[in-house]
Image (cartoon, grey):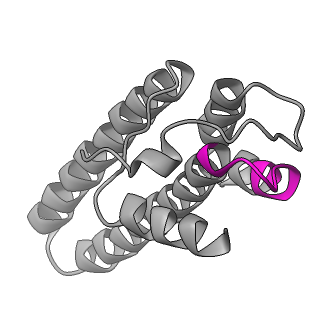
Amino acid sequence: MATPSSSLMTGSGRRTSGLEPNIAAVLSYLVMIPPITPVIMLLLEKEDRYVRFHALQGLLLGLFAFLGILGLEMVAQAIGFVSRPLEIILNIAIFLSGSGMFLLWIYLLIRAYQAKSVKVPIIGDEAARRVLREQ
């Protein structure tokens, strides 16, 4: 996991949500599937890049996790009609990817509460690029 650029590491001092930046960042990850709280934080916080980065990263990660696991479930269901062993292997892969997402979610919650930014590969890069482009 990479660390974001220094401009995203701390809050800008100007807050439109009225929350401390680390609390707002934690709320950005609170309900990721479906990504409800990231959307709320993006709507509430207009100024603080730190909070917007975490909200956008939480939104993208929640969408990726939801669509990825849904897609794997559909493939496993379809393959189940052809080969039961392949369906079992895919279900194990679904379980492992869901467990990995859960552990990543806990890690992001803890790091956000500690006011530390963590950039998830690809998703975090896109979130940082979009937040920096807004300013």
User: Which quarter of the picture shows residue 62?
Assistant: bottom right
Residue 27 lies, in percent from the top left, at 69, 34
Viewport quadrant of the C terminus: bottom right
Q: Nearer the viewer, residue 77 or 60?
A: 60
Name above or below for residue 62 compared with residue 27.
below
Q: How many labels were placed on the picture?
A: 0
Residue 131 lies, in percent from the top left, at 59, 65
Q: Nearer the viewer, residue 56 or 64?
A: 56
Name above or below for residue 89 compared with residue 113.
below
Viewport quadrant of the N terminus: top left
Q: Residue at x 62, y 30 (%)?
A: 26
Give the side of residue 108 with respect to residue 3, left or right.
right
Residue 106 lies, in percent from the top left, at 43, 27
Q: Residue at x 44, y 70 (%)?
A: 126
Q: Residue at x 66, y 42 (%)?
A: 28
Magenta region's main secondary structure? helix
Give the side of residue 126 with respect to residue 92, left or right.
right
Give the side of residue 112 with respect to residue 13, left or right.
left
- Magenta-span inclusion, residue 47: yes
Give the side of residue 70 with respect to residue 59, left or right.
left
Name above or below for residue 89 compared with residue 24.
below
Span highlighted in magenta in the image: 40-50
Q: Nearer the viewer, residue 95 or 55?
A: 55
- Magenta-span inclusion, residue 3: no
Q: Residue at x 50, y 50 (%)?
A: 7
Name above or below for residue 84 compared with residue 30.
below
Residue 95 lies, in percent from the top left, at 29, 45
